[in-house]
Amino acid sequence: MAYCPKCGIKVEEDNRPCPLCSFHIPKVNEKRDAVVRVRKFPKTANPYPAYLRRVLNRIFIFITLLVFLAVCLLFYIDYEVNEMFTWSRYSNLSILAGWVFLYFSFGYLQSFYKVIIGIGLDAFILLLGLDILNGSLQWFFPLAFPIVAGTTVISISYWSVIRALSVRGFNMIGFFFMAIVILSMWINFFIHNYRNETNPFNWLIVTVLQIIPVLLVMIYVKYGMPERIKQKIARKFHL
């Protein structure tokens, strides 16, 4: 349906001129005008993420080349000096594990869970390899394995709780400190167990002494800190 531009009555598209005022009604292609109106404005797009991704890719490629050169150089120096590979095996394994850690840190995996699991596996392989190169598996299974596994599980649990409860602001910091305390308790237990110094009573005392300061700080931030200071800190750290 069209309208007469002079008198404003509704007219059929094929009525030429207007049946009321005899004004000549120009022919309008509504489909073409709709396409023109749609294409008038360009699509909105933020070029910054693509630019940042290209920069990070170039940096990572440069680091990869440096890692390759460093590994080759260390193997060459070790073989020239000792006529066999000795210390370079430890160094190069650590360098390669660091390169894998950078790969997960450069945002190539979008899932936070995959990043945590990937870093955990990287730490497992590194520590297992160092213990094997040492000639025997003395400390990996009783010490390194449970510590890395506990760190991975606690990290995944922390992120899951944050997402499930939609925790924001100071509450996120509080949950983070609680996760750190639990992780410290876990590591402390296996270190003492590895040294055959495990005393449940002493371990319980140390655990309580670690939890109490964190709880006191969380209670003060929740109920005692002035709202003005909370807002200032939140703006400062984008909480």
Image (tube, grey):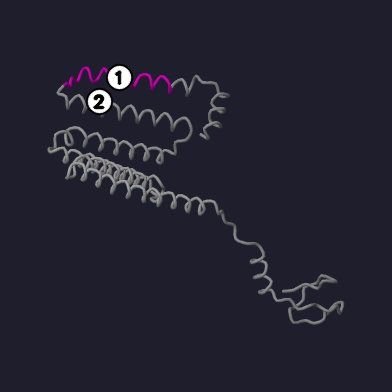
SS state under label 2: helix
Q: Identify the magenta region.
A: 197-218
Residue type, mark 1 in image: Val
Q: Is residue 165 left or right of residue 51?
A: left
Looking at the picture, how far across and down is residue 129, in whole percent?
20, 42
Looking at the picture, how far across and down is residue 43, in whole percent?
60, 60
Residue type, mark 2 in image: Asn
SS state under label 1: helix
Tell me what residue is drawn at x 21 percent, y 17 percent.
201
**Which residue lies under the disc numbered 2?**
188
Q: Quadrant of the N terminus?
A: bottom right
Q: Nearer the viewer, residue 80 or 117?
A: 80
Neighbour tally class for label 2: few under 14, some 14-19, many 20 plus, Cα within 10 Å: some
Q: Does residue 6 sit above or below 113 in this rendering?
A: below
- Asked whether 217 falls inside the magenta stretch, the response is yes
Q: Does residue 58 sit above or below 116 in this rendering?
A: below
Q: Earlier in the sequence, mark 2 or mark 1?
A: 2
Mark 2 or 1: the one toward you? 2
Q: Nearer the viewer, residue 126 or 206?
A: 126
- The overriding secondary structure of the stretch rendered in magenta is helix
Q: Is residue 39 left or right of residue 5?
A: left
Tell me what residue is drawn at x 48 percent, y 51 percent.
55
Label placed on residue 66: none
- Asked whether 104 falls inside the magenta stretch, the response is no
